[in-house]
Image: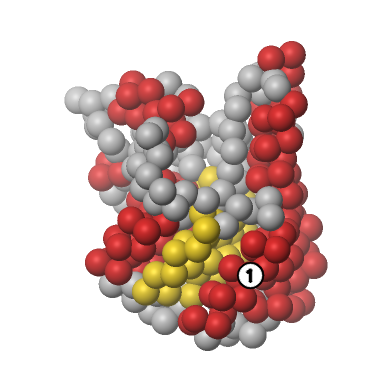
Amino acid sequence: MSLKGKTLFITGASRGIGLAIALRAASDGANIAIAAKTAEPHPKLEGTIHTAAEQIAKAGGRALPLVVDVRDDEAVAQALARTAETFGGIDIVVNNASAIQTTPVAATDMRRFDLMHQINARGTFMVSKLALPYLQHSGSPHILMISPPLDMKERWFAPYTGYAMAKFGMSLVVLGLAGELRSKGIAVNALWPRTTIATAAIRNLLGGDEVMRRSRKPEIVADAAARIFEKPASFTGHFLIDDTFLAAEGVIDFDRYRVDPTEPLQPDFFVPEDVPPPPGVSLAAKR
């Protein structure tokens, strides 16, 4: 199976996990719509929609850089229409764009709360909704959320209720939309990393270089996403953890995804206790 000729619409694809998924698909010869806000260089964030487009082209894909704020219904509608017009349709939508603030309720500014919900839950709902008329014409359509399993435990909410609500909101869209679209042949799934992923959000918001060294590279999520897209549309309604899913697909070398093998891996938020690492895979440091 290959993604050659497939068209992906990826939110937040100018950097991080979104860009990694784009580059993995581009290596197969896919078309990528980069739907992100960053058109000009940012002092704290690497990459723009234009630098991402250059990387995608070098990787073997075709790129369409689009300035899109997923809070803006009209901007999303226009971006989807332009993507379909440019590439002849849309096969895959990746809801990757997300906002984060890991503060307790008393310390959470309501503007930040609103931002998280507008981007994470509402943005995912709206992008998926507006993409449906295009996806229904694809031979194997997929919607993928970068969001966690619905493990409704107090431990995930108590430290950062606002963020948990917004992130689980994305997964609730998976739960409902998978059931709604199953008979229409459109797959809807969620993918979540077991460990922190080395992205700008980790460096700037969640621990800096120390946690970056204890993270896995975005390529682990990208490789898992590519294998999901290669599945038939009947593969739907799943909440997948990256290494568990890849191990079931026959992947055995997970050390290549580590940023620094001499450091133990940092577990991510929201990974259920009843989904341990696959056999032979350890989060401990390699000596």
Outermost residue, front direction? 40
Q: How is the image coloured?
A: secondary structure
Q: Is residue 142 left or right of residue 52?
A: right
Residue at x 38%, y 23% (from the top left corner): 208
Q: Determine whether 241 is above or below 21 in the image.
A: above
Q: Work out whether residue 164 or residue 253 is closer to the camera in this orientation and state it.
A: 164
Residue found farthest to the left: 287
Residue 71, how many percent across, how many down? 68, 51
Q: Residue at x 78, y 58 (%)?
A: 176
With 266 as the anchor, is 57 left or right in this view? left
Q: Amino acid at mark 1?
A: Gln
Q: Quadrant of residue 188?
A: bottom right
Displayed quadrant of residue 168: top right
Query: Residue under circle 1?
Result: 78
Comparing 2 with 52, the one in front is 52
The quadrant of the picture occupied by the C terminus is top left
Which quadrant is the N terminus positioned in?
A: bottom left
**Does dot 1 land on a helix, a strand or a loop?**
helix
Residue 178 drawn at (x, y percent): 72, 63
Residue drawn at the location 48% of the way across and 26% of the way down:
205
Asked which quadrant contains residue 238, the reply is bottom right
Q: Nearer the viewer, residue 286 or 3?
A: 3
Q: Dot 1: few (<14), some (14–19), or many (≥20) neighbours within 10 Å?
A: some
Expressed as whole percent of the image width and height from the top left, the position of residue 134 reads 65, 78
Whether residue 119 is visible here, answered yes or no, is yes
Q: How many marks?
A: 1
Q: Nearer the viewer, residue 201 or 79?
A: 79
| Residue 146 visible in the current orientation | no
Q: At 39% across and 33% down in the image, what residue appears?
A: 44
